[in-house]
Image (spheres, grey):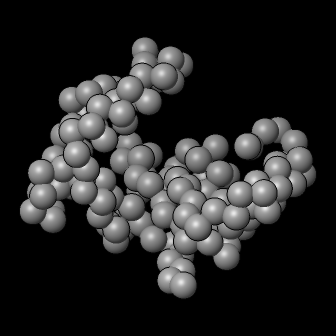
Amino acid sequence: IITSDWSSDVCSSDLLNREYRPSLVFVPSATDTHQDHKTVADEGFRAFKRTTILAYELSWNTLEFSNRCFVTLEEEDIQKKIAALYEYNSQQACRTYVNEAYVRALALVRGTQIQKPLAEVFDVPRLILD
């Protein structure tokens, strides 16, 4: 969604919101230090401010993160996440976090925090209960 044409991006986000009317939106954490991730987070908060928003953890870029929402995972979920990460060819050669061991280790830590085998964690910038 985010390109070099900011005004077009704002319109795109607004159009997505109107077309799909999502009940849940995932964005990077507001404390992510990567400039592109921060821009996506800011635009997500702006465009979907009347929607429940969960912010995901990119632990290698995030200065602070609040573990407010835990989602238990199954082995199938982990396999899908690993497969999705490997689709980002540009990240594989130079990024140590794009590997199965890292993904599994983080899911194990998050699961241990809630006494489950595996979990994913999110911050909750906005929760709307209808």
| Residue situated in front as seen by the camera: 70 or 42 | 70
Q: Classify residue 79 by image quadrant.
A: top left
Q: Quadrant of the C terminus?
A: bottom right
Residue drawn at 12 percent across, 58 percent down = 116
Q: Residue 112, relative to residue 50: is it above or below?
A: above
Q: Residue 101, relative to residue 38: is it above or below?
A: above
User: Which x, y percent locates residue 110?
Assistant: 21, 55
Q: Classify residue 49 by image quadrant.
A: bottom right
Residue drawn at 58 percent across, 67 percent down = 23
Q: In the visual, does 51 lie left or right of 102? A: right
Residue drawn at 74 percent across, 61 percent down = 17
Q: Is residue 129 visible?
A: yes
Q: Is residue 30 visible?
A: no
User: Which x, y percent locates residue 81?
Assistant: 37, 36
Q: Residue 121, relative to residue 95: is it above or below?
A: below
User: Which x, y percent locates residue 120?
Assistant: 30, 53
How many numbered discs, if any?
A: 0
Residue drawn at 43 percent across, 15 percent down = 93
Q: Quadrant of the N terminus?
A: top right
User: Which x, y percent locates residue 114?
Assistant: 15, 65
